[in-house]
């Protein structure tokens, strides 16, 4: 029978261990300066809400918008809506490129709806855009930033960052890393049999970013198609009984329908939010450093990401390619953070 003294000693030991563990866990989360470049877009809005609900880990310096899912006026309006819904109107939204570098523009209204935001009513948000263009904001901010201090999450076509890099290649000095939602290898494409939408919408921009030599992580369809909604996962979000849970539940219910039909899946991916989850809890994901080449030639391979997963060519490993993820862990994180919002 344990004596009372032994019990007290054991209790003190457990409390001390808990204190050490929680201190270590807190140390493990290094706060990031983050710029989110995005084409909202249903899954972009979910990503923005997740990021803006996580101020301990992410200092969202600005949101920069680009044409992609819908035209620039609507992606910029939707970014301002997400900011309003997150209660974070201090974060500036800069509008950027209205078209790709070279190719004729394409959009995805068939997936994201005419307003670029399915399943919910949109309105004109109170707070407007920041003065100035997103590209100039990137140039000015990254030029004067502390060395390698700013992370950029790219959730749409990479046009803005490409334009900034062409205008001022030295801005790489301010970039810690770029995390891209885009590309596909094992999964195959979603806009052609081989190409993913963000890359297909502006492969030339993606090549400029790749060639810049910045630290680059890709979160491709290979992993986003393994992190799927389900009835239970959507119910856990809607059960939050707050505006954020209702909005995300309604958006995702509508957004995933097309993918579920097209792929015959029991649920749909939340592509862009997977990038933010990677930044918040990288331990939910696995991948490896590989060589990536982007095809921008006219033809069936246009926009394809040629990912040398087995190092067949022995070329420079220029990208970290995320290939798998913990789906339930992702939805638990998303639910837990949305619970913080109104
Ligand atoms: O292919 C999926 C990507 O294209 C996502 O970023 C989605 O928002 C669209 O931009
Ligand atoms: Ca997007």
Image (cartoon, rainbow, N blue to C red):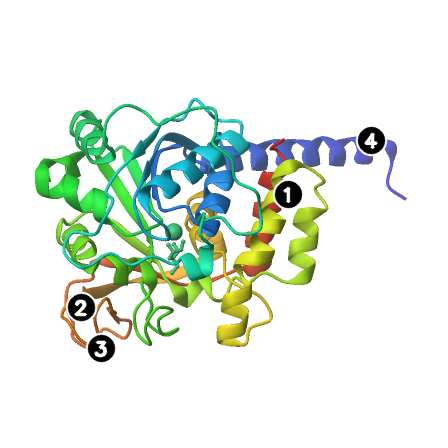
Left or right relative to 300: residue 53: right
- Residue 56 percent across, percent down from the top left: 49, 30
> Which mark is nearer the camera, 4 or 2?
2
| Cα distance between the residues tagged 1 and 3 | 40 Å
Q: Residues within 10 Å of mark 4 (few under 14, many from 20)?
A: few
Element assignment for label 2? loop
| Cα distance between the residues tagged 4 and 1 | 48 Å
Residue located at (43% from left, 47% from top): 44
Residue carrying label 3: 300
Residue carrying label 1: 245
Q: Residue 295 carries which label?
A: 2
> Which mark is nearer the camera, 4 or 1?
1
> Which mark is nearer the camera, 3 or 4?
3
The outermost residue toward the front is 114
| Cα distance between the residues tagged 3 and 2 | 10 Å
Residue located at (21% from left, 43% from top): 161
Which corner quadrant of the image does residue 308 belong to?
bottom left
**Do the numbered discs 3 and 4 sit on residues whose CB atoms are within 8 Å?**
no
Residue carrying label 4: 5
């Amino acid at each position: 029978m344990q004596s009372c003294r032994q019990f007290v000693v054991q209790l003190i030991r457990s409390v001390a261990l808990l204190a050490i563990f929680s201190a270590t866990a807190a140390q493990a989360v290094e706060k990031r300066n983050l710029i989110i470049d995005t084409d909202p877009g249903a899954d972009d809005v979910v990503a923005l809400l997740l990021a803006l609900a996580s101020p301990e880990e992410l200092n969202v310096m600005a949101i920069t918008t680009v044409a992609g899912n819908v035209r620039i006026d609507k992606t910029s309006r939707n970014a301002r809506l997400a900011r309003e819904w997150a209660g974070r109107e201090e974060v500036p939204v800069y509008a950027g490129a209205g078209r790709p570098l070279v190719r004729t523009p394409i959009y995805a209204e068939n997936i994201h709806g005419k307003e670029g935001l399915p399943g919910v009513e949109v309105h004109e948000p109170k707070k407007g855009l920041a003065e100035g263009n997103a590209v100039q904001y990137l140039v000015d901010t990254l030029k004067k930033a502390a060395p390698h201090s700013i992370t950029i999450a790219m959730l749409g076509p990479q046009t803005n960052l490409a334009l900034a890099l062409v205008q001022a290649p030295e801005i790489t000095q301010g970039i810690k890393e770029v995390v891209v939602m885009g590309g596909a290898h094992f999964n195959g494409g979603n806009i052609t049999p081989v190409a993913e939408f963000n890359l297909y919408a502006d492969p030339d921009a993606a090549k400029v970013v790749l060639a810049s030599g910045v630290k680059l992580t890709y979160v491709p369809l290979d992993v986003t198609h393994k992190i799927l909604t389900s009835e239970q996962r959507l119910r856990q979000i809607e059960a939050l009984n707050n505006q954020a849970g209702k909005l995300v539940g309604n958006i995702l219910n509508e957004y995933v329908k097309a993918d579920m039909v097209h792929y015959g899946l029991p649920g749909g991916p939340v592509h862009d939010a997977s990038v933010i989850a990677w930044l918040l809890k990288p331990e939910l994901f696995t991948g490896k450093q590989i060589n990536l080449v982007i095809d921008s030639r006219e033809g069936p391979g246009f926009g394809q990401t040629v990912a040398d997963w087995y190092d067949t060519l022995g070329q420079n490993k220029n990208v970290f390619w995320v290939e798998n993820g913990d789906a339930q862990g992702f939805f638990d994180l998303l639910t837990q953070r949305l619970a913080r919002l109104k």
